[in-house]
Amino acid sequence: MKQILRGIRLGVLCALGALPLVASPALALNHAPVNAGFVPNIGHFAPNAKYAFRSNYSDADGASDLRHVFLLLNLTVSGANSIYLYYDVPTNKLYMRNDANTAWLGGYEPGSNNVIQNSRARLWCGEVVTAKVGNNFSIRWILSFFDVLQGQTLRPWMFVRDTAGATAGWESFGGFLITRPPVNLNLNPASGSFYTDTPVSFTTQYWDEGGADSMTKCVLLVNDTASGVNSIYLLYDPKANRLYLRDDANTAWLGNVAPGVNATIENSRVRLNVAATKVQRHDATLTVTWSVSFKETVSGQRPVAWMYVDDDRAQSSGFQSMGRLTIVGKPSNVSLSPEVVFLALKNTNVFSAVYSDPAGTGAMTYNYLLLNTSLKFENGILVLYDQKNNKFYLRDDANAAWLGGVAPGTNVSVQNSRVSINVAQVAVTKGATKLQLDVPVVFKNTMDNQSVNAWMRVTDDRSLTSPWDQMRSYTVIDIDTPPPPPPG
């Protein structure tokens, strides 16, 4: 009993602090690391394109406590025939597992000019970036997948180990599909000369392994660069079955009409004939036949024809150069001389009219020169050169018949009540795209002291024509008649 009482007293004294106690050293507590997430962990990714993926890890003992981080891309947790990546934190080295899962490949530092690959993917070490912030560690992997993965689903699996050997087991973070992006198949025609104000059809074909109904935008862009500013930027929306044309400033879509509707969409460069624009779908291929007319503002240009397509998997072909076009303008009136104000009555006045056609001089059909008080042919002086048949004509006073119809240089004269023209002195000079018509005109007395305007016009074999352009104004005077005396 005494021994029991002594034991009780001793316990009480110890509790009251009567006796000193020696504390044992506390054991340090190690926290297991954590797989903190992976992005992007869903979506569609294409073979042979670079993608950035970020895997995040954390450790309550600090990011420096991490030893090994792993990323496995495979449908199951298996290193064989997979994309199995490993980063050794203390040594700052990157590795990839071989196909047979028997050896690590690589051992290169992030930022080094090295690439590690197996049959399924390539790791671009030079673009890999690691970051430590407090307890958090992240690594941005730069990967490109090979065609062998086409159509396969990959799950991101993560595993991490710290310096004490504690781990976070394999955990899955989503899944994504390796799919081929949509493709620009063909543009027809992809080259050649195309005339302004003349309808032409361009056929574009697009392909998507998800089927024609998977496509969301089908584009034909005609411009020097892949820019929508001051361009011909055509869009077909397969989901809504609508056609659009971008405005000149690239700030808004014009149109929103279905193919085949009796409508046109236009900006300063092109006119889209919606009624003649057609769309066809066949399995994975979508074909758009665009009916367009180029405007004179793009005359003389040689723009690139670009195509673009994207789909509902957020994949795209990117803008791809498919051809180069030459835009040829309509014929035009270039110049007229003489550059004087007064013309001599009963003397020979030689008019030199210059015309141009981007399609070439040989494309011209009719070259006109008109002298009259207004833009009318009756009681005027209207001459015509028929370039195809090399014939020269003068219109009669009543505008009822052509006079002449002989080749320039022929020793004949044609005349109406206002002028006489010696065809023997008519000359035609042809260049590559310009034609000069020299017409010797002798004004008769009916034109004494008459003021006239001079107009020119040219047509070509594309059914294109210049406007009637007023080039000059003249007054016909009798230089042999002395001027009136001064007043007073």
Image (spheres, rainbow, N blue to C red):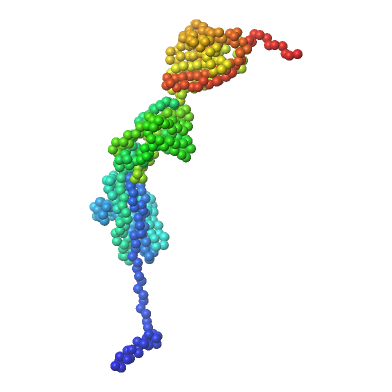
Picture coordinates of residue 39, whole percent (x, y): 36, 53
Q: Residue 408: image x %, image y %?
A: 48, 10
Direction right: furthest residue: 488
Count of numbered circles on the image: 0
Task: Point out the image quarter for the C terminus.
Answer: top right
Residue farthest toward the bottom in the current orientation of the protein: 2
Taking 408 as reference, is 450 left or right?
Answer: right
Quadrant of residue 136 within the rendered picture: bottom left
x, y percent for residue 104: 28, 55
Up-down: is 236 above or below 351? below
Can residue 303 be seen from the camera position used here?
Answer: no
Who's the residue at 31% across and 36% down the image? 281
Q: Nearer the viewer, residue 104 or 15?
A: 15
Left or right, 41 with respect to 335, comes to left
Asked if one can make out residue 177 in the rendered structure from this viewpoint, the answer is yes
Give the quarter of the image for residue 272. Answer: top left
Front residue of this view, candidates 440 and 250: 250
Q: Horizontally, is 149 left or right of 484 in the view?
A: left
Q: Residue at x 34, y 52 (%)?
A: 41
Question: Furthest residue to the top?
Answer: 412
